[in-house]
Image: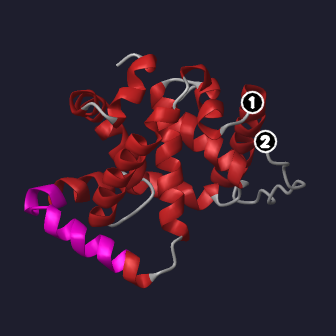
């Protein structure tokens, strides 16, 4: 799908189906790295595409590729779920997700979660990063976006994304490869 065609997914079922088929695997990989529950992962994947339909009319090709935009939407959806405190909302999402998944779907999602387990080990080291550094690192290292695409997804300048990526890599090297490395502290970053 060409970037200028992306807004059509909001009102054209065929365009949405093509967009969904092209990106569903990437979105699922993004989500399963951030949750250990296959039912919640399935629900969040669906929510990402629902949010993409709602946001499609406001998509501007000048701000980046459709995949970068979609990862920005996915990041917002996953973050919103982590902030959500209501037990009722979480319980409703789990129950509705279980009704929509058959045994094969659950097994496939569990396989993906198991495959992502090694990635989750690295997330413990990622806790040392600032939110901005972590967001840039994840989009570039895990979701295969370029620094410019990650910057577009986060709404920051490309140079800011490259600086955050450099800091994140330095911090992770210290935590993953040197057990005696002191925690790197720096002043809080200004918002973009």
Horizontal and vertical percent position of residue 156:
72, 35
Q: Is residue 61 left or right of residue 178?
A: left
Q: Quadrant of the N terminus?
A: top left
Residue at 51 percent across and 67 percent down: it is 82
Q: Earlier in the sequence, mark 2 or mark 1?
A: 1
Residue 10 occupies quadrant: top left
Q: Main secondary structure of the magenta part?
A: helix
- Name the disc covering residue 191, or none: none
Residues rendered magenta in the picture: 90-106
Q: Mark 2 points at which residue?
A: 192
**Residue, disc 1:** 157
Q: In this view, does 184 lie to the left or right of 146?
A: right
* Residue 102 shown in magenta: yes
Q: Relative to the observer, which residue lies in front, 182 or 129?
A: 129
Looking at the image, do the residues carrying marks 2 and 1 touch, with CB atoms under 8 Å apart?
yes
Residue located 28% across and 35% down the image: 20
């Amino acid at each position: 799908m060409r970037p200028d065609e992306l807004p059509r997914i909001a009102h054209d079922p065929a365009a949405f189906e093509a967009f969904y088929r092209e990106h569903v695997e990437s979105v699922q990989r993004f989500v399963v790295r951030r949750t250990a529950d296959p039912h919640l992962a399935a629900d969040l994947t669906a929510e990402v595409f629902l949010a993409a339909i709602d946001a499609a009319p406001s998509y501007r090709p000048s701000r980046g590729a459709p995949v970068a935009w979609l990862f920005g939407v996915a990041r917002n959806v996953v973050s919103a779920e982590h902030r959500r405190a209501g037990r009722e909302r979480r319980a409703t999402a789990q129950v509705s997700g279980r009704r929509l998944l058959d045994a094969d779907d659950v097994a496939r999602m569990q396989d993906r979660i198991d495959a992502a387990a090694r990635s989750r080990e690295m997330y413990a080291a990622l806790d040392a990063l600032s939110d901005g550094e972590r967001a840039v690192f994840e989009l570039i290292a895990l979701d295969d976006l370029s620094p410019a695409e990650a910057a577009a997804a986060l709404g920051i300048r490309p140079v800011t994304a490259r600086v955050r990526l450099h800091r994140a890599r330095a911090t992770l090297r210290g935590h993953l490869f040197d057990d005696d490395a002191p925690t790197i502290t720096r002043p809080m970053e200004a918002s973009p």
